Image (cartoon, helix red, strand yellow):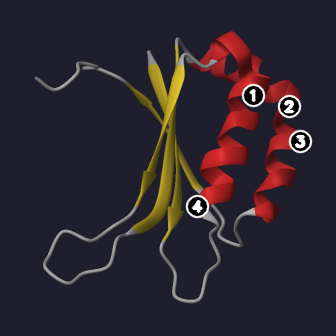
Amino acid sequence: MIKVSVMYPNKPGARFDHAYYRDRHMPLVKSRMGEHCRYYTVDRGLAGGTPGAPASFVALCHLYCESVEAFQAGFGPHAKEIMADIANYTDIAPVVQISEVVVDAPAR
């Protein structure tokens, strides 16, 4: 399984509409990708690693897919529509990373 992380750096004065991202953008992504996206998570940055430090990222999402090929099959045909929606919630250029998931277990 792979994870596609889309991370929005926390920049002073940047705009990010968390409600739109959570309630409209990510459901759009999931609906377009269909079965190619097993599930996704959305994070809202709260703080950095030291006391009083700001979060490195204002928001992140993680798309879990069976493979890079599955991600490409689900995202590729809808990339233009999905990317065009970014302007509706932010002016931050996202940072994207694709990772192999080596452990995916719920906390006990």
Q: Which residue is mark 4?
A: 18
Q: Nearer the viewer, residue 41 or 4?
A: 41
Instruction: Name the image quarter holding the N terminus.
Output: top left
Q: Which residue is mark 2?
A: 78
Q: Given the image, on which type of amino acid does mark 3 rest?
A: Glu
Tell me the residue at 87%/52% (across/down): 84
As measured in the structure, the alpha-carbon distance from the residue carrying label 1 to the one carrying label 4 is: 22 Å
Asked which secondary structure carries label 2, the reply is helix
Asked which secondary structure carries label 4, the reply is helix
Tell me the residue at 85%/31% (across/down): 78
Classed neighbour count for the residue bearing mark 3: other residues with Cα under 10 Å, few (<14), some (14–19), many (≥20): few
Measured as percent of width and height from the top left, residue 96 is found at: 56, 48
User: Label 2 near label 3: C-beta < 8 Å?
Assistant: yes
Task: Look at the picture and state if 75 lies above or below 87.
Answer: above
As measured in the structure, the alpha-carbon distance from the residue carrying label 4 to the one carrying label 3 is: 19 Å
Measured as percent of width and height from the top left, residue 77 is found at: 87, 25
